[in-house]
Amino acid sequence: MAVDQTPGKSPVRAEEIREGHLYGVLIQAQTEPKELPDWFITNQIRAAEDHYEHELQLFFGVKRVKSDPQGRELATDTYDVAVPATDYDRDFFTEGRWGWHYFDYRPIVEVESFFFSYPGTDRAQSYEVPTKWLRIDYKLGRCQLFPTTGPAVIATFNAWVMSVLAGGRGLPQSLFVDYKAGLSQEELLRNHQDLLEALRINATLGCFPTLTNVRTSGLGSRSLSMDGLSRSEGFGAGKYGTYSGIIEQYKEREKELTKSWRDAEKGVISIIL
């Protein structure tokens, strides 16, 4: 069987799990010549990476995000993630009320281009915003538009905006932003060991259903009568099998790490009723 041995998207590797979080845990069945293979642990790491990317809306690694690349007929090798062009808030252009534009992904690494365009028109009919006008909050993934350079440039921009706002209405999906977002491996290792630890634990938890069977062959208990003539076997071994204790500890630790990271990096989630 051909097995994909390429590493995942994060710095976490199979040997860390096997020699760290699975230290002291039986990983080789008595009747098998090999211990739990690296490819199996690597698959659990990949599953944990996908889980956190979806749950926390982040990227392990830096990704190129393009607005409406299909509509712009961009080559598929020029971007990693496609997002639709977005609407803009009128506060963007109201003096004294500089509104925020929120990106779909964060943290932001770099904003490559920021432009307005009438839907369905070519790039020549768009207005390219100088990146110097952007005040970017890289961590929270948002920016403000603040025109600062040259009266002639600002006048041109104001004329374009007024043409869009004529009649008191704006055009949907007319704001295009191309940017890079995600956490590089260097950034993860330097500032996000808590997130990596949660990922290691999540990957370890994915191994335990198999490891429980490795140790017990699915049995929870065995008993033998005093005369040796009768024997019984049972399958009850706690909620999570033989390793219920350590699994409960890991689940609590993973929950704690994920919550603290989300609160620090994304902000505390609140609901107003």
Image (cartoon, rainbow, N blue to C red):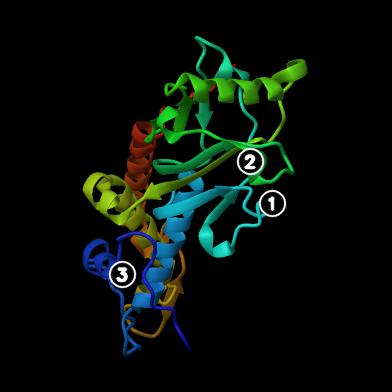
Q: Earlier in the sequence, mark 2 or mark 1?
A: 1
From the viewer's perspective, is residue 161 above or below residue 45?
A: above
Q: CA distance from mark 3 to mark 1?
A: 41 Å
Residue marked by disc 3? 14
Mark 2 — residue? 85
Camera-near label (2 vs 3) is 2
Kind of residue sitting beneath label 1: Gly
Rendering coords of residue 266 (x, y %): 41, 34
Circle 1: is it few (<14), some (14-19), or many (20+) Cα within 10 Å?
few
Would residue 32 be seen by someone viewing this image from the given angle? yes
Depth check, mark 3 against mark 1: the one in front is: 1
Q: Amino acid at mark 2?
A: Ala
Check disc 2 and report its element: helix, strand or loop: loop
Amino acid type shown at disc 3: Ala
Q: Quadrant of the C terminus?
A: top right
Which of 119 and 27 lies nearest the eye of the viewer? 119
Q: Quick one: 184 or 115, which is closer to the camera? A: 115
The reply to whether residue 224 is in sight is no
Q: Secondary structure at mark 3?
A: helix
**Disc 2 to disc 1, C-alpha distance:** 10 Å
Q: Foreground residue, 1 or 223?
A: 1
Q: Earlier in the sequence, mark 3 or mark 1?
A: 3
Marks 2 and 1 close (CB-CB < 8 Å): yes
Q: Which residue is mark 1?
A: 71
Residue at the image point whose x is 51% and y is 57% from the top:
80
